[in-house]
Image: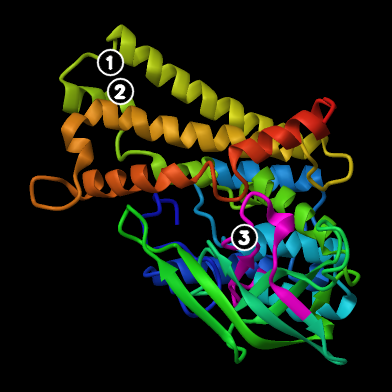
Amino acid sequence: MRTRMVPGEEINGGRKRLGNNLEAYEWLALMAAKGWTVPTWPVEFGGAGLSAEEFTVLLEELQRINARPPLGGMGVSMLGPTLLEYGTEAQKQQHLPGIAKGEVAWCQGYSEPGAGSDLASLQTRAEDQGDHFLVNGSKIWTSGAQHADWMFCLVRTDPSRPKHEGISFLLFDMESPGVTTRPISLINGESPFCETFFDNLRVPKSQLLGPLNQGWPIGKRLLQHERSGLSVLANGDRAGPLERILPSQPLEQLVQSYAGLSPSDPHLRNLIVRSDMEKRAFLLTQKRALQESESETPGAATSIFKVVEANYVKAQLELQLLIRGTQGLGWEGETFSDEERAMCRLWLEAKSISIAGGSNEIQFNIIAKRVLGLPD
């Protein structure tokens, strides 16, 4: 578990999509037993109850030995922290231990065909039926829905209210009658996203997170947890989500291998140094945000992380393409290596990173209003 993770070995929870490395599951079990998959969560919910200072020490030690992340997924990074803040005791007991152990995988039901960046315009309806809600509608870009066990979902429960009101936050089992998923093929040849349809889906009222018709603030808080990237730090992966885009050899050696140039070539050297500086600054800022957080919950500044990371990932993959030349455009065939084909598809996939999780334009609006205090 001190070697670099390769595609297919990730563990994001649940039993529908298993990693192909059995040792990774031993690593998960050992870390979960100590509460270190979610170190700052309370012990009774599967965490270790660490303070921010203890969390930082654990992080540094995991990074020192180049430890792999034991567990990822939306349960750890998004829903779990939100449940801790808004969930009832019964909801926490039901959902959090399974997330911490990697037993349950979650997906997100936010965007709709007519409500993407303007999420508050969502139209999926949840009608009050006494002891349950009856949900009808659809979601799109539901990442990993075909592999998820449960979904957290924003629905409209009172269409008579202004669009930011009358929205509620529901949790439900993806195996419930009335739920259908359909993968969406992307230009990289894979289907991480899905369309998800609800046809008279029954959701018990016990799975309403927070007050009725007040799901919008909860949904925004969850996105702050996602955009902060701070949960990824708990994995001990020094690069976190940036690990996937790294080539098998340093960029300086990549230049010699492909371009036949010296690493001292001024143009490429400038690009490589800038790329490395941006990554280091990004990771240090994340760490400082964790250490300086007074409330231990992310705020509007997390939108800065989202924008910077999205732009960095795309720029770094463009730099690799520049270095590899036409060999960086390999889709299939023996003339391209496994890494060349993988990086080409990742380069294509990365086009979506400045849209997924809230487009850059939305993040700029949040930064302008909530961080800089600029007028509407």
Residue 165 lies, with reference to residue 200, above or below; the image says above
The CA span between labels 3 and 1 is 45 Å
Residue 245 lies, with reference to residue 177, above or below; the image says above
Task: Answer whether labels 2 and 1 touch (C-beta < 8 Å).
Answer: yes
The quarter holding residue 17 reads bottom left
Front one among 72 and 180:
180
The CA span between labels 3 and 2 is 41 Å
Residue shown at 32%/7% (left/top)?
A: 266
Residue shown at 69%/72% (left/top)?
A: 124
Q: Is residue 363 left or right of residue 340?
A: right
* Helix, strand or loop under label 1: loop
Extent of the magenta region: 100-126
Whole-percent x, y for residue 225 in the image: 72, 51
Mark 2 residue crowding within 10 angstroms, few (<14) / some (14–19) / many (20+) = some
Mark earlier in primary sequence (3, 1): 3
Task: Answer whether labels 3 and 1 touch (C-beta < 8 Å).
Answer: no
- Residue 125 on the magenta span: yes
Which residue position is annotated with label 3? Answer: 111
Give amino acid for label 2: Glu
Give amino acid for label 3: Ser
The CA span between labels 2 and 1 is 5 Å
Which residue position is annotated with label 1? Answer: 263
Front one among 126 and 48:
126
Give amino acid for label 1: Pro
Quick one: quadrant of the C terminus? top right
Which residue position is annotated with label 2? Answer: 252
Quick one: quadrant of the N terminus? bottom left
Which residue is farthest left? 334
